[in-house]
Image: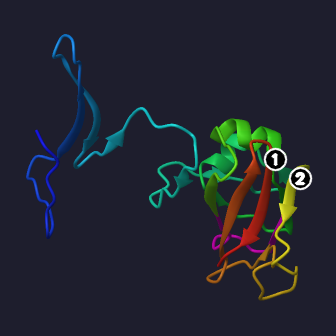
C-alpha cells in the first residue's frame, strides 16, 4: 500500500497497529499497538523523551537519603516527613544505566511534598550538575527546596549530556 496523507484527524474505534511484513515469507509482525492500553515495542534509547504523566508507580522518601536510580526513574517522588529532608540524586552513571540514557535523553522528575510537615531539599550527586541557568535562590528555577503543604510540588528536568552525566534544572 502506498503512503496516504490525511487532512484532519484519523479515527478508529478499535485502535491502531503498526506492522512489518517479511519480504520473503509475507509474515506480518505487529510492532506497535495504539489504543485504550497503548504500548510501544522496539524503541531505541536514542534521544528519547520520558514524559509519563500518569506515574503508575511512585517512590516514597521520608528521611534524608540518597535516592536509588529506580526511585528516580519512576519520575515521581513523595515525601511526608515531619522533619527537614534532603534527597540526594543518584550518580549520573547509576541513573543513566537505569534509564538506558544516552546524550540527549530527557526526563521529568516530580517531587510531591504536599503531605509533608517540613521542607525537602534536592541535592545532585557525582556527574549531576545543577544547570548554569539556575541560580540556587528561592523562587528561581534553581531553587532546590520544596515547601511542605499545599504548595509543596516541584518539577525538575534531567537532561543527559552523555550516558553517565546529567544537568539538573527546576522547571516548575
Identify the secondary structure beneath mark 1: loop
**Left or right: where 40 falls relative to 106:** left
Residue in view at x 59 percent, y 49 percent = 74
Measuring from the top left, give residue 59's x and y in whole percent.
64, 50
Q: Nearer the viewer, residue 18 or 50?
A: 18
Query: Mark 1 touching mark 2, by CB under 8 A?
Result: yes
80 w.r.t. 143: above or below: above
Residue 107 x %, y %: 61, 57
Q: Is residue 86 visible?
A: no
- The question of residue 120 being in magenta is answered with yes
Q: Specify start and end residues of the magenta stretch as a single range.
A: 110-122
The quarter of the rendered structure image containing the N terminus is top left
Depicted 17 relative to depicted 50: above or below:
above
SS class of the residue under badge 2?
loop
136 inside magenta stretch: no
Q: Earlier in the sequence, mark 1 or mark 2?
A: 1
Is 154 located above or below residue 13 in the figure?
A: below
Q: Label 1 crowding class (10 Å Cα cut-off): few <14, some 14-19, many 20+?
A: many
Dot 2 corresponds to which residue? 125
Q: Residue at x 18, y 45 (%)?
A: 16
Quick one: 165 or 71, which is closer to the camera? 165
Q: Residue 118's image quarter?
A: bottom right
Can you identify the residue that label 1 sits on? 90
Residue 19, label in figure = none
Amino acid at each position: 500500500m502506498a503512503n496516504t496523507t490525511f487532512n484532519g484527524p484519523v479515527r478508529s474505534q478499535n485502535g491502531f497497529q503498526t506492522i512489518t511484513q517479511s519480504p520473503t515469507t509475507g509474515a506480518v509482525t505487529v510492532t506497535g499497538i495504539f489504543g485504550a492500553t497503548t504500548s510501544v515495542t522496539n524503541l531505541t534509547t536514542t534521544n528519547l523523551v520520558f514524559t509519563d504523566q500518569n506515574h503508575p508507580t511512585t517512590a516514597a522518601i521520608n528521611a534524608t537519603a540518597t535516592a536509588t536510580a529506580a526511585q528516580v526513574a519512576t519520575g515521581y517522588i513523595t515525601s511526608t516527613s515531619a522533619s527537614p529532608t534532603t534527597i540526594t540524586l543518584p550518580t549520573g552513571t547509576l541513573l543513566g544505566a537505569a534509564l538506558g540514557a544516552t546524550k540527549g535523553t530527557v526526563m521529568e522528575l516530580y517531587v510531591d511534598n504536599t503531605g509533608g510537615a517540613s521542607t525537602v531539599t534536592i541535592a545532585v550527586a557525582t556527574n549531576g550538575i545543577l544547570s548554569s541557568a539556575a541560580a540556587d535562590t528561592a523562587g528561581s528555577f534553581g531553587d532546590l527546596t520544596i515547601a511542605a503543604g499545599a504548595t509543596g510540588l516541584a518539577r525538575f528536568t534531567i537532561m543527559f549530556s552523555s550516558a553517565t552525566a546529567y544537568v539538573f534544572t527546576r522547571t516548575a
